[in-house]
Amino acid sequence: MISKFILKLLGWTIISEFTDDIRRSVMVVAPHTSNWDFIIGRLVFNAIGLNVKFLIKKEAFVFPLGYFLRKWGGIPVDRHKKTNIVDQVAGNFEGKNELVIIITPEGTRSRVRKWKKGFYNIAQKADVPIVLGFLDYKRKEAGLGPVIRTDKTYEDVASKIEAFYSDKTGKHPEKFNLSAIRGASKGNREK
């Protein structure tokens, strides 16, 4: 497969705990510090044969980029409209045997003080597990980590997430603030 070849050429190794029971899940991907995250991530998902969807601001869906974003699984989100995005995204799971929606809770490639908590709310509302995906630029490893069931409190989930990502390094490490998961609400950029 061409994606595996490209990853190998770039020196990346795929580490994956992927199992069929997570074909219906919300996937958190971190650290998110570079536009390269999308390219490497897309190659990884192609290589392991996982069809994923991802949320992206609607402003990115301009021609010709919009065509490719939709083809690659992009779901446009209007961040300025007063709609319940949690309900809207969770509703996508209804009647589907397979759907993996990727969310970057940092909400931006910049350093933030607070992670957005929508990934947890969507997973709970849709009654699907949370899967931890990662890109570790220091080790050049990427893949899927543990599955977290949503019958736990946000604090329990945050502890597991914090432990998992504690040794992962983004392309720009100074932009990743893992302690921001504890202050989850709106993803406020650090000044």
Image (cartoon, helix red, strand yellow):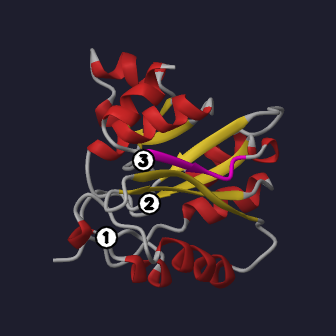
Q: Judge the density around disc 3: few (<14), some (14-19), many (≥20) Cα neighbours within 10 Å.
A: few
The foreground one among 27 and 2 is 2
For the point 74% across and 40% down, the residue is 23
- For disc 3, the marked residue is 81
- Image x and y of residue 43, in percent: 44, 32
On the picture, is 9 further left or further right than 179? left
Residue 84 appears in the figure: no
Residue 23 falls within the magenta-colored stretch: no
Residue at image point 38% right, 58% down? 107
Name the residue beneath numbered marker 2: 30
The span from disc 3 to disc 2 (Cα, nearest Å) is: 26 Å
User: What stretch of residues is rendered in magenta?
Assistant: 13-18
Q: Are marks 3 and 2 in contact (CB under 8 Å)?
A: no
Q: Amino acid at mark 3?
A: Lys
Whether the residues at callouts 2 and 1 have beta carbons within 8 Å, the answer is yes
Q: Determine if residue 104 is in view.
A: yes
Query: What kind of element bears circle 1?
Result: loop
Q: Amino acid at mark 2?
A: Ala
Say which quarter of the image contains residue 191: bottom left
